Image (tube, helix red, strand yellow):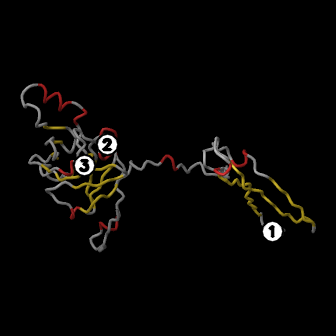
């Protein structure tokens, strides 16, 4: 067994450093440090002392900076990966966006005002389209930034057509497609308006939404990427027991 743990001895040796062109009385005294590693090993009742002075390679290459000292560093290598890892485990294949997420209780939403929510680092805006057909989902969701000046659309309003209207310059957008429908700064007559509205740069990114079990859900993948068929998306992660008429529960959302 070891008679004592490894001991690090630090010795300080004063060194006189004289500025060029200065007298001896104007010289400054600096200090250099040397670290010796002393390891005491007991072997069959005999003690042997091993001394090893750290080298530049052992301390790690470090560029000398005027006025600074070299500090020894330690590098810890990660353990070798186990060859017995299951091939069925593929954490890198999980897509956080390809899932439904709850964003609000429907009872807490204002039917006349936009609602903003940041999901996976992306600001989203939700609102209720009062022009939606009966027995259809009236909630719309797009990226919460106007393509004109990147102003949050949630700071605007829902107009009489059920569209989201930017509060800065009045640009309006459809919630189901994200298409821009009006740019007040352009004349209504002529080709300028039609050209601007047809440009993809004037659109916002739309997302799928659903309402189930009193909760508003969103699928944070652009409709341009996943398509318009909501039935082709994964099923909502609902709780079947909540659908039972005799079920009484209290649900809380934590953000």
Q: Quadrant of the C terminus?
A: bottom left
x, y percent for residue 209: 27, 51
What whole-number distance in Å separates the C-alpha atoms at marks 3 and 1?
68 Å
Rendered image quadrant of residue 50: bottom right
Horizontal side of 208 relative to 128 (left or right) equals right
x, y percent for residue 192: 13, 27
What residue is at 72 percent from the left and 52 percent from the top?
Answer: 15
Upstream in the sequence, badge 2 or badge 1? 1
- Residue 85, label in figure: none
Q: Residue furthest top?
A: 191
How busy is the neighbourhood of tag 3: few (under 14 within 10 Å), some, or many (20 plus)?
Answer: many
Q: Residue furthest left?
A: 189
Upstream in the sequence, badge 2 or badge 3? 3
Q: Check disc 1 and report the residue beneath it.
A: 4
Q: Is residue 81 visible?
A: no
Q: Check disc 3 and report the residue beneath it.
A: 141
What whole-number distance in Å separates the C-alpha atoms at marks 2 and 1?
64 Å
- For the residues bearing labels 2 and 3, Cβ distance under 8 angstroms: no
Q: Of discs 3 and 1, which sits in the foreground?
A: 1
Total labels drawn: 3
Q: Check disc 2 and report the residue beneath it.
A: 222
Rendered image quadrant of residue 169: top left
Of residues 45 and 67, the one nearer the viewer is 67
What residue is at 28 percent from the left and 74 percent from the top?
Answer: 246
Which type of secondary structure does the marked residue at label 2 adopt? loop
x, y percent for residue 9: 76, 61
How busy is the neighbourhood of tag 2: few (under 14 within 10 Å), some, or many (20 plus)?
Answer: some
């Amino acid at each position: 067994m070891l008679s004592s743990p490894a001991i690090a001895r630090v010795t300080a040796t004063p060194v006189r450093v004289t500025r060029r062109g200065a007298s001896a009385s104007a010289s400054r005294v600096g200090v250099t440090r040397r670290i010796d590693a002393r390891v005491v090993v007991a072997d069959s009742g005999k003690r042997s002392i091993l001394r090893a002075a750290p080298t530049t390679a052992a301390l790690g290459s470090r560029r000398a900076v005027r006025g600074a000292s070299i500090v020894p560093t330690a590098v810890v290598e990660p353990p070798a990966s186990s060859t017995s890892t299951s091939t069925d485990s593929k954490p890198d294949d999980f897509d956080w966006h390809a899932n439904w997420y709850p964003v609000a209780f429907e009872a807490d939403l204002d039917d006349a005002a936009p609602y903003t929510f940041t999901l996976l680092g992306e600001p989203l805006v939700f609102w209720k389209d009062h022009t939606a057909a009966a027995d259809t989902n009236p909630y719309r969701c797009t990226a919460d930034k106007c393509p004109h000046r990147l102003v949050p659309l949630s700071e605007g309003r829902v107009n009489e057509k059920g569209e989201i209207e930017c509060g800065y310059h009045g640009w309006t957008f459809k919630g189901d497609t994200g298409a821009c429908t009006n740019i007040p700064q352009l004349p209504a007559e002529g080709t300028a308006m039609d050209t601007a509205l047809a440009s993809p740069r004037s659109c916002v990114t739309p997302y799928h939404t659903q309402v189930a079990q009193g909760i508003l859900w969103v699928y944070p993948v652009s409709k341009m990427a996943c398509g318009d068929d909501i039935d082709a998306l994964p099923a909502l992660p609902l709780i079947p027991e909540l659908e039972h008429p005799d079920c009484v529960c209290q649900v809380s959302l934590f953000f």
